[in-house]
Amino acid sequence: MRAAADTAWIEERAKTLGFDLCGVVRAEKFPELAQTEEWLARGYAGEMEYLSDARRSNPQNAMPGIRTVIVCALNYNTEQPKSTDVAATVEGDEPRGWISRYAWGSDYHVVVREKLDNLLAALRQNFEEPFEARVYADTGPVQERIFAKYAGLGWLGKNTLVLNQQMGSWFFLGTILTALDLTPTLGPTEAPPADLCGSCRRCIDACPTEALVEPYVMDARRCISYLTIELRGSIPEALREPMGRHVFGCDICQDVCPWNRRAPVTKEREFQPRVVPVKGDASPDGESFFLPRLEWLAGMNEVEYREAFRGSPIKRTKWRGLVRNALIALGNASVRRDTHAHTRISALLMRLAVSPDAAISESALWALSRIQ
Ligand code: SF4
Ligand code: SF4
């Protein structure tokens, strides 16, 4: 096994390259990896078939010859207020939606990947012998959260996310799978960080769709992140109203978490909310990803969508998904009847009610029935 000094060097180097946390863990079949099978059997993954990939439940299948995993965390928390602190849908006459904090800026896959690539390049320079390695920024058949726990980065909270006592939960995880025989960050007698959720259950109680079906267990099919990003087709009717104004992801179970109350703010410019220029005079200063106007989102065509969300994680939901989500949010926006906004939004909904896309037309009709 390599000396502990090598692990310390890696952790230090990761921080020099911009990561906030880093730890090394042996590639073992940790108990939580086995629990995935039961979770899948309950159908909680919904349409996310990639989660059944057998490599996810055993790291030995993820890379032949794997010995250790280097886990890195990158803070994406910015200074903007929490979704639970920002007044509901209307500012003036403008109904606004909520995009999850992690998606306000540049695509984190690219930002995290670049830093991981730099770390791997540094490793290859430092360790002379060649070694097998794979880099994953939320893209590979690995359960980063579980490796993060055993690498000492935090505990798995009742909201199912990794929580760190100093940083809260606003961070991305990235991993380097390696064949290097590194000394793990936690010694043989050291346990992973203690679970500090205690008797708290704020996340469970605050979840509007009751997706946290029991502490530490999420039924993804009910989670707004799944509904707005992963689910194709129409949103189940019973979950539309609880979705509120969410158009891409949901931050509520993180916003209410006491460990995020004093979470540090990132210096990374890439994660600040984007403002994109748009044609027309509705928003001469451009449209912001922080509390975006729902009319802008619902009214854009595919070309405008591609233009606005180039290099953004929001492209994952695709144009029809984002329009569908904005329509549901408009249906929840309590637009006052005697306003210009009501007239404009009704016209927009009527136009989209005859869209050839079934999910869009059905969502527009639902929204119309709610605002009329
Ligand atoms: Fe519930 Fe939102 Fe958390 Fe999903 S992200 S579990 S919907 S609070
Ligand atoms: Fe744990 Fe409470 Fe945070 Fe939920 S809100 S993750 S129970 S500390």
Image (cartoon, rainbow, N blue to C red):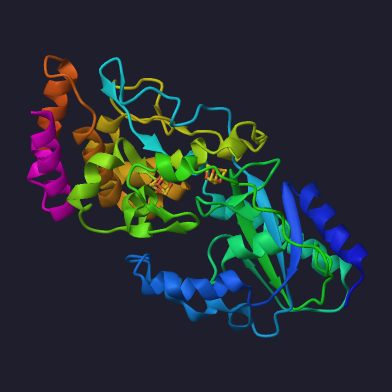
Residue 301 part of the magenta segment = no
Please state the quadrant of the image where ligand 2 appears.
Answer: top right
| Residue at the spot 50% in from the left edge and 56% down from the top edge | 216
Q: Does 173 appear above or below 30?
A: above
Given the current orientation, which residue lies at the most extreme front position? 199
- Quarter residue 41 falls in: bottom left
Q: Residue 50's spot in the image, x, y percent? A: 42, 71
- Quarter residue 25 falls in: bottom right
Q: What's the magenta region? A: 350-372
* Quadrant in which the C terminus appears: top left
**Of residues 20 and 223, the one drawn nearer to the viewer in this rendering:** 223
Q: Residue 147's spot in the image, x, y percent? A: 65, 65
- Quarter residue 337 falls in: top left
Q: Which SS type dominates the magenta stretch? A: helix
Q: Is residue 50 visible?
A: no
| Residue at the spot 38% in from the left edge and 40% down from the top edge | 308
Q: Is residue 96 visible?
A: yes
**Of residues 312 and 209, the one drawn nearer to the viewer in this rendering:** 209
**Of residues 294 and 225, the one drawn nearer to the viewer in this rendering:** 225
Left or right of 83? Residue 347 is left
| Residue at the spot 89% in from the left edge and 74% down from the top edge | 2
* Quadrant in which the N terminus appears: bottom right
Q: Does 99 appear above or below 173?
A: above
Q: Residue 354's spot in the image, x, y percent? A: 7, 45
In this rendering, the count of numbered labels is 0
